């Protein structure tokens, strides 16, 4: 049961409306999790795990471990269906100082860099098609941030629909690579690939190292929790959406690693800075167009992640302002946000 102070009529009038459904919950979770990291994490996990079998098992076990975490988030989001995510959970646990620190770390340390990096990544991938560099590239990145900011400010419903569409578009290329690549898998390459010579850890230790390296790839599944106050029927849609998100991401990552391990040796994966591009080049049907296809994939994938982050991350600051903590840090509290 929530221990929040009761809201005044004026505070209730300022609450955001519940306009997002199950599709938006899944789109936010998948859209945030499946980002630019997957384009390099295959190589990092391969280098940590040391063998093709452990590479697949690392993503499988790493994904399965996220399901209990999503259950926890589902329980918290259902119990406290309001905007703010982790900030709200710290506050409801009775620790306003920790809630304050959580919100301000997000505002100063985590949100701006992540949004900036994604915007610059989009501009860099666009440079594959359009020769932009220097200050022009940075201006293009700023333009993407401003465009998505205005879109999500204008309409949460419109932003939710766009996020659902772009998330579907970012999944399709991965599904195509998995669906086509699975017909060209070389069983002997997957089953008999020798461990990396540079890896000293073996057995269970190597598997644990691989699982640890997948952590970043699965980060972001609980993005919808930051917008719990705008989800229709939160006690139904949030748990269902969070669990479906975990299984969708798990299926994509495991399918991708199975195909990668069946088409590339673990040495090739570990040494490559662009393992997805290398994987696409090994598939006969699309190999000649691998560079173009992966560049398009990257733009769509990172656009989806950037849109998702700009959509949900400001809800932390909104929740802090609603409770007076955001303004209190400047030494004053706006009267309308003063808690009774």
Image (cartoon, rainbow, N blue to C red):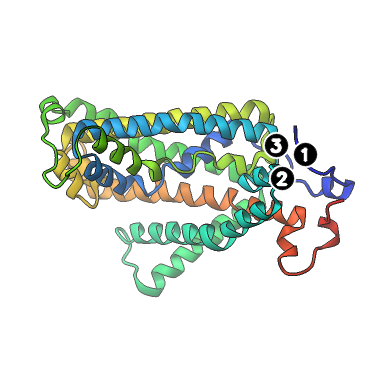
Secondary structure of the residue carrying numbered label 2: loop
Residue 299 appears left or right of 203: right
In this rendering, the label closer to the viewer, 2 or 3: 2
Residue 162 sits in quarter: top right
Secondary structure of the residue carrying numbered label 3: loop
| Residue 313 % position (x, y) | 58, 51
Residue 282 appears left or right of 57: left
Residue 278 sits in quarter: top left
Q: Which residue is mark 2?
A: 94
| Residue 279 % position (x, y) | 21, 41
Residue at the location (62% across, 28% down)?
A: 237
Q: Nearer the viewer, residue 186 or 153?
A: 186
Q: Nearer the viewer, residue 332 or 313?
A: 332
Residue at the location (59% across, 28% down)?
A: 239
Sequence-wise, the earlier of marks 2 and 3 is: 3
Q: Give the class, few, some or many, for how many residues have Cα within 10 Å of label 3's Cα (few <14, many ≥20).
A: many
Residues under labels 2 and 1: Cα distance? Answer: 8 Å
Location of the N terminus by quadrant is: top right
* Proximity of marks 3 and 1: CB atoms separated by less than 8 Å: no
Tag count in the figure?
A: 3
Q: Which residue is mark 3?
A: 80
| Residue 232 % position (x, y) | 69, 32
**Residue 287 in sight:** yes
Sequence-wise, the earlier of marks 2 and 1 is: 1
Give residue 3's mark: 1
């Amino acid at each position: 049961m929530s221990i929040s102070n009761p809201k005044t009529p004026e505070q209730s009038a300022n609450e955001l409306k519940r306009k997002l459904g199950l599709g938006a919950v899944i789109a936010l979770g998948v859209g945030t999790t499946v980002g630019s990291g997957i384009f390099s994490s295959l190589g990092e996990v391969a280098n940590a795990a040391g063998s093709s079998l452990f590479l697949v098992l690392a993503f499988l076990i790493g994904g399965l471990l996220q399901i209990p975490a999503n259950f926890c988030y589902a329980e918290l989001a259902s119990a406290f269906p309001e905007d703010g995510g982790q900030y709200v959970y710290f506050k409801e646990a009775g620790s306003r100082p920790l809630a304050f620190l959580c919100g301000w770390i997000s505002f100063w340390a985590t949100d701006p860099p992540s949004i900036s990096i994604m915007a610059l990544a989009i501009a860099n991938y666009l440079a594959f098609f359009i020769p932009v560099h220097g200050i022009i590239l940075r201006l293009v990145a700023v333009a993407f941030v401003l465009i998505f900011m205005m879109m999500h400010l204008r309409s949460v419903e419109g932003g939710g629909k766009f996020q659902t569409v772009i998330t579907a578009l970012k999944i399709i290329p991965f599904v195509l690579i998995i669906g086509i690549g699975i017909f060209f898998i070389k069983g002997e390459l997957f089953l008999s690939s020798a461990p990396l010579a540079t890896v000293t850890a073996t057995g269970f230790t190597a598997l644990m190292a691989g699982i640890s390296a997948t952590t970043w790839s699965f980060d972001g599944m609980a993005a919808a929790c930051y917008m719990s106050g705008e989800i229709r029927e939160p006690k139904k849609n949030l748990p269902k959406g969070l669990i479906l998100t975990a299984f969708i991401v798990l299926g994509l990552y495991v399918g991708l690693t199975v195909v990668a391990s069946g088409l590339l040796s673990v040495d090739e994966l570990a040494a490559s800075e662009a393992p997805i591009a290398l994987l696409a080049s090994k598939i006969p049907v699309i190999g000649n167009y691998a560079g173009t296809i992966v560049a398009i994939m990257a733009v769509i994938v990172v656009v989806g992640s950037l849109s998702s982050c700009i959509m949900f991350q400001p809800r932390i600051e909104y929740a802090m302002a609603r409770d007076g903590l955001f303004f209190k840090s400047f030494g004053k509290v706006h009267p309308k946000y003063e808690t009774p």
